[in-house]
Image (spheres, helix red, strand yellow):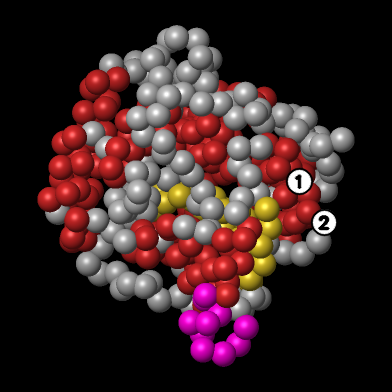
Amino acid sequence: MNSSPRSSLTGKVKRRPWWVKSLTGWSYVIYEMLFQRMQARHLKNPLPLPPLDDVTCIVTGSTSGIGLETARQLAFSGAHVVMAVRNQSAAFDLIKKWQTERHGTTLLSIEVMELNLLSLSSVVKFAKALNSRSKPLQVLINNAGMFSMGEPQKFSKDGYETHLQVNFLAPALLSILLLPSLVKGSPSRIINVNSIMHYMGFVDTDDMNFTLGKEKFNSTKAYSSSKLAQIMFYSVLQKRLPLEAGISLLCVSPGTVHTNVTRDLPKLVQGVYNLIPVFLFSAQEGSRSALYAATDPEIPEYCEELKADDWPTCAYISHYCRPTRAAKEAHNTRAANEVWEKTLDMIGLPLDAVEKLLQGEEAMCKYTDS
């Protein structure tokens, strides 16, 4: 793998008006939708995976869509899959269905654990239970996400805007708290399912909740900004993890996938969806970039090269399973560090949480149930 040409921004970037970013962002979405099949024509569907015996993978949001396909294919390849979900009964029903598809062959190694990303205390509880096993974890796939298009602003019980918490804050907390298990499973990987829509995002660390009136809230702003924040946060985490920790960090784009949010898209995009559905990826096709990032043997070396070259962002893998560049805003290292510090404060962790956890110490989180 070859990294992209060097680019680094260290100062403040003047933000373009939202209508400009929105227009640019939707043009990226439409372009991706129209040409993604051509770009991914070299990929097989489903993506062939190597044997994954003795590999443990956590997949969040694995009862529907991309997460479902990701968990199923990992399990079918021999991995021990932890389905981290809110709806446990739906997960158990899927396991029965998948086992039936195997026609009585070797039992799938799948377990179900409750995880509600709208509750940071649920994230802490999940991580504590997983770490208490003192077993290696090789892959964490932060797949779960939400995009409530056209709906009014909502907040979690923790007080955070729901897109921000589900798409970014809760997975960030989960990733950091699971570092002890990921170190035990080294070489290990954290994969974040991102989106082309991060190109229209912006991050104001003074108003990530859209409550100060600096920017009028809409769900597209909230979703795209949460995805941009995700890249910026993991870009800093990549720099803070020593090479000897053996943890690779990646964000992946699944492509433009046919989901139940399409009915709420802007009229222009909705019209394109209705006219040319053949260009949209299925959930199985959309899972390929995450599966590639989770299993390709060259990924650790590629991530090490980026770190050695002091590349400003974490690895970003396209929907056609090739390294690509994240948006220009994600390359602003000063802004990324601001996002890092603000995020740790919001999820209730000390600034030295990563260092403490890597040294085998406890990093107290304010969302730990007493």
Q: Looking at the image, which residue is at 62% across and 24% down?
A: 159
**Which quadrant, please, contains the C terminus?**
top right
Q: Looking at the image, which residue is at 53% across and 58% down?
A: 62
Q: Residues within 10 Å of mark 2 (few under 14, many from 20)?
A: few
Name the secondary structure under disc 2: loop
Say left or right for 120 vs 74.
Answer: right
Q: Residue 43 placed where, x, y %?
A: 29, 69
**Magenta segment boundaries in residue numbering:** 97-107
* Circles 1, 2 touching at the beta carbon (< 8 Å): no
Q: Residue 350 placed where, x, y %?
A: 74, 29
As drawn, the residue found furthest toward the right would be 370
Residue assigned mark 1: 125
Please tell me in which quadrant of the rendered image residue 215 appears.
Answer: top left
Q: Looking at the image, which residue is at 54% across and 38% down?
A: 166
In terms of sequence position, does the residue under pointer 1 or pointer 2 come before the other? 1
As drawn, the residue found furthest toward the top would be 213
Say left or right for 349 vs 1.
Answer: right
Q: Which mark is residue 282?
A: none
Q: Check if residue 120 falls in the magenta segment.
A: no
Residue 186 visible in the displayed image: no
Q: Is residue 35 above or below residue 152?
A: below
Q: Name the foreground residue: 333 vs 126.
A: 126
Q: Amino acid at mark 1?
A: Lys
